[in-house]
Amino acid sequence: MINYTLEELLAADMSRTFKDGELGFTGLATGKAAATYITNIPLAAMELAKRTHAPNLDIWLCGVYANADWSSLDRMPESEFEQEMMYLPCEAQEYDYPATPYAARGGEVSFGFGSGVQVDKEGNINSVCIGDCRRPKVALVGSIFLTEHMALFGREYIMMPHHERRNFVEKVDYISGVGFPGGRDGRAKLGLRGGGPAYIYTPRCIFSFDEAGKIYVKSIHPGVTKQEVIDNTGFDLGNLDNVPTTPPPTEEELRILREEVDPKGILLRMDHR
Amino acid sequence: MKERKIKLCGMEEAARYVENGMRIATGGFSVYQKPMAFVHELIRQKKKNLTLVGSTHSIDADMLIGAGCLSKIETSYVGLEKFGLAKNFRRAYEGGEIEVVHYSEMMAWDRFLAERERMPFYTVDFLGGSDILNKNPEIKPFRCPMTGRQMYAVPAANVDVAIVHVHAADQYGNALIQGRHMMPQSMNAAITRGCETVIVTAEKIISNEEIRAQAENTIVPAFKTTCVVHAPFGSHPTPTLLASRTDEGFFRYYADISGTKETFQRFLDRYIYGTKSFSEYLQFIGKEKLEELKRGI
């Protein structure tokens, strides 16, 4: 029996969804839970994929740094544009903003990672407010780049560090990023060029969307019960009887993650090692 | 013979270009290279009913909101990144004291591109289904005359005054960008292009000869600049590339003291209303701290 962490489980599972030759995009999120889900797990997953089946996967950090070399870092940077970041070793560095309009607007970004305080059963996400946006009950930070992620990228991985009823709702209070309102047909009518949400990763399970654009539980993590997923999701999930368990990382995947991708433990915590 | 116009002036004079009710844009990005010395002066002069227009905001917006200078903000983000939420913004938005118009990040830059071209709008095709579109009557849907596809006209930034903080400028208003730079410095370029009134604050004033020696780095040429103000540490507590780092301790203090209206009022009374100028404010920060912020740069 191999020991692994939840973060390693998610990173390994995610890495298998990337294809060779794709372009992945992620920002530097701040705050421990957000940084783990939006930045660190995706980076570990992409680096793992590069070392297994996808050597031509290119990673763009903050839309600025292409294929950065992390080995020189002793901790993950927390600020995207602090002076030190300018010297992050990488292959290409975009100076002018929006650094990625040709890639984002041109549909060249294969996938990105986003999050919100709420996500709903249509895959819409909200990072603007709880309540009416004219006078909200709770003001959040704003849409930032999520609107573009969900509309222009080939697909989006929605990364939710918390999986509670208040995060997984029937209908979000504000649509910062558009999923599949009215299913895939409904989305097609909106004229969005990008693919929209493909997966939602949470500490309890992984969601995906079927051919009609309907959300379903793709797998439940080892040790999590079906009832737990139902109890902590604010919309109906249907019958979960045939939902598989999220496949654990292989010994080789864990070895690459721990020895090659993240030997200093700056992406994924090391307390289990 | 008439001499070339010297555009160097004091902060007090520069801030008078901003009149109550105007639309303004601050340069920099999020928590980086914000023209804070200028923001302080707007607060000291008790400006009212301003609209702040931009892509991502932090302490610049939060301080102006807490001091009652803004009635509206058009942005994709107001927060202090790793230092937490922008609490004056949050309080005012939840309390109905400020109108917030949400734009997404890239589109918020597009609005300055439209302004640069003197076009009334920028064309965006990626808004269908979003509340960015559905809750904003200023964005107008239209059919593309070429393809028949659904497009959206996003209004130009329409800014009256743009303010940027740079690491160096000359007395005629030539302002520099670093050859190797990042997004906050690009934003400084973007917001000045289309604006009629451009105010440059600079860490140091250098000679015209020094500008000429690196003309490729002049980002705001003199003809675009309305006035230039010498403002060392003028982005404090946000960093200025090649000049000073983030004052992390001060940012944490700010995140804490902006927690309630009462404590924030005490902050304003001491640091802004209680000082005549930004250099007086910097005395509170202290020489030792300021030197530390420059170390290793």
Image: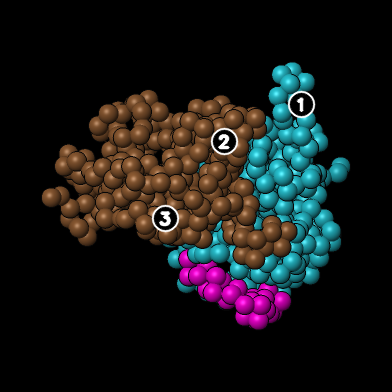
Chain colours: A brown, B cyan
Relative image position of residue A209 (x, y in whole percent): 46, 38
Chain ID for label 3?
Answer: A
Q: Quadrant of the C terminus of chain A?
A: bottom left
- Using the image as rendered, state which of residue B158 and residue B175 is in the foreground: B158
Real-space Cα distance between discs 1 and 2? Answer: 24 Å
Magenta part, dominant SS: helix
Mark 3 is on which residue type?
Answer: Ile
Q: Quadrant of residue A256?
A: top left
Q: Which residue is mark 1?
A: B143
Mark 1 is on which residue type?
Answer: Arg
**Of callouts 3 and 2, which one flags the residue occurring earlier in the amino acid sequence?**
2
For the residue labelled by badge 2, is the local secondary structure a helix, a strand or a loop? helix
Judged by depth in the image, the label closer to the viewer, 3 or 2, is 3
Q: Is residue B41 left or right of residue B56?
A: right
**Residue at x 28% of width, y 38% of height:** A48
- Using the image as rendered, state which of residue B175 and residue B121 is in the foreground: B121
Q: Which residue is mark 3?
A: A230
